Image (spheres, rainbow, N blue to C red):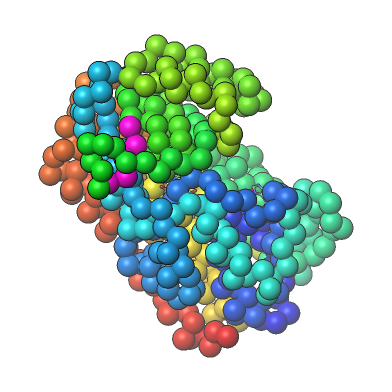
Amino acid sequence: MRDTTVLISGASIAGPALACWLDRYGFQVTVVEKAPAPRPGGQAVDFKGRTHQTVLERMGVWDEIRQRRTGAFDTVYLDDAGRELAVMTGEFTGGDVEILRGDVAAILYERTSSGCEYRFGDSITALAETRDGVRAEFERAAAQTFDLVIGADGIHSRVRRLAFGPERDYVRHLGYYYCVAGAPGFGHDARRPERLTARAWNAPGRMAARGGSKGSHLYLFASPELDQARGDAAAQRRLVGQRFAAMGGEVPSMLAELDRLDDFYLDAIAQVQMKGRYTSGRVALVGDAAYGNTLGGFGTGLAVVGAYVLAGELAMAGGDHAAAYARYDEIMRRYAKIAGNSNAGRFMAPKTAWGIRGRNWLLGSRAFGLMMRYGDKAANDIDLADYPTLTGVR
Ligand SMILES: Cc1cc2nc3c(=O)[nH]c(=O)nc-3n(C[C@H](O)[C@H](O)[C@H](O)COP(=O)(O)OP(=O)(O)OC[C@H]3O[C@@H](n4cnc5c(N)ncnc54)[C@H](O)[C@@H]3O)c2cc1C
């Protein structure tokens, strides 16, 4: 593998996780990331079940991830008078270990920065496949040819656009937008001091939450695609203000402080649909670029498992990337089904008053326990190959 060069676009979770394995197997890895430096913070993400844990243990990062976990938040749904209507438990939203996305990225970056070349503040602008490799052009660096190129650049992946086609062919808007603002808020509620809690309010097609693990504010609202949502941050802040203007509870005071909060981010709740093919020629996709589903709850686990499988298959294939990619497609087609099943918008912000009541009832019912068990089962629905023993990892 010593001579095989791999370019990875994206240094969040999928990219450095893949870099970690490829470096151990002896590939020459370059990671290009558009941000000027590793991005700290971000919302909390989570890992659930033994499959995620096994992969993280094999990477040697499980203990550190546990040490830096945030603790899971219960989301308490309230009416306008502050009465409790329902509780979404932290075990549902936070899995076994909840941790800031930036902390996972930092741990993975630290493990890989000496063996891999990281280029921050740059991005691929063009890809052209030849018989022997893929020629990549960059915004800043000189063009270079690599044996393989991997898109780990998130739900709006540029590698996917360059190698597969326009985003509209692969990303489906799920009828909702979300907005996070401010750093995650780590607080206790006087009524349940032993648990971390976020407070949330619903109106049909809307949810506003304060003080949770995603950001100090989290807003979700139902909407078809909007031009305003693609505008600048000021237009996006106005949009949130308009959509939530008539809501009660603490929402008016949240809106009053929204302009002062940093880390404002608004995007569509969307799902990537690759029809089970995450590879094309010498290019492959991993993580959200391949099987993202915003707020679907399994993205981070899928990213680390996908990276493990892709690197392992490449190492086992002894230079035959086409065979490795075919195996990767086959394995992830099945495992990534989990990302196709949910629409967090519909669950967190049902579109009718009846829908909200039904969701609140579900949260307190035995059916909710079954739903959680289904999620746990799906997160483990893969036979992990023991790649390291087969290939003699260094
Ligand atoms: C609000 C919110 C809450 C979430 N909560 C959870 C949760 O509770 N549990 C969970 O498992 N998951 C959650 N997720 C999903 C989780 O964040 C993703 O599934 C996970 O981060 C996937 O990692 P990734 O590396 O594939 O993509 P990303 O984390 O999206 O990273 C993509 C990287 O590529 C870089 N990039 C993008 N474009 C380019 C380019 N053109 N050139 C170079 N670099 C580029 C970006 O800067 C970024 O660093 C949540 C996501 C959001 C938005």
- The reply to whether the magenta stretch includes residue 63 is no
Depth check: 105 or 372 in front? 105
What residue appears at the point 64 percent right and 80 percent down from the top-left corner?
26
Residue 311: tell me if it is visible. Answer: yes
248, above or below 172, in the image: above
140, above or below 243, in the image: below
Q: Quadrant of the C terminus?
A: bottom right
Depth check: 146 or 246 in front? 246
The magenta-colored residue range is: 195-199
- The reply to whether the magenta stretch includes residue 197 is yes
Residue 211, image x, y percentages: 40, 36
Please name the predominant secondary structure of the magenta segment in the image: strand
Residue 359, image x, y percentages: 23, 31
Residue 124: tell me if it is visible. Answer: no
Q: How many marks?
A: 0
What residue appears at the point 39 percent right and 11 percent down from the top-left corner?
246
Q: Is residue 338 left or right of residue 299?
A: left
Q: Is residue 118 left or right of residue 323?
A: right
191, above or below 81, in the image: below
Residue 245, image x, y percentages: 44, 13
Which quadrant holds residue 155? top right
Residue 12, image x, y percentages: 58, 55
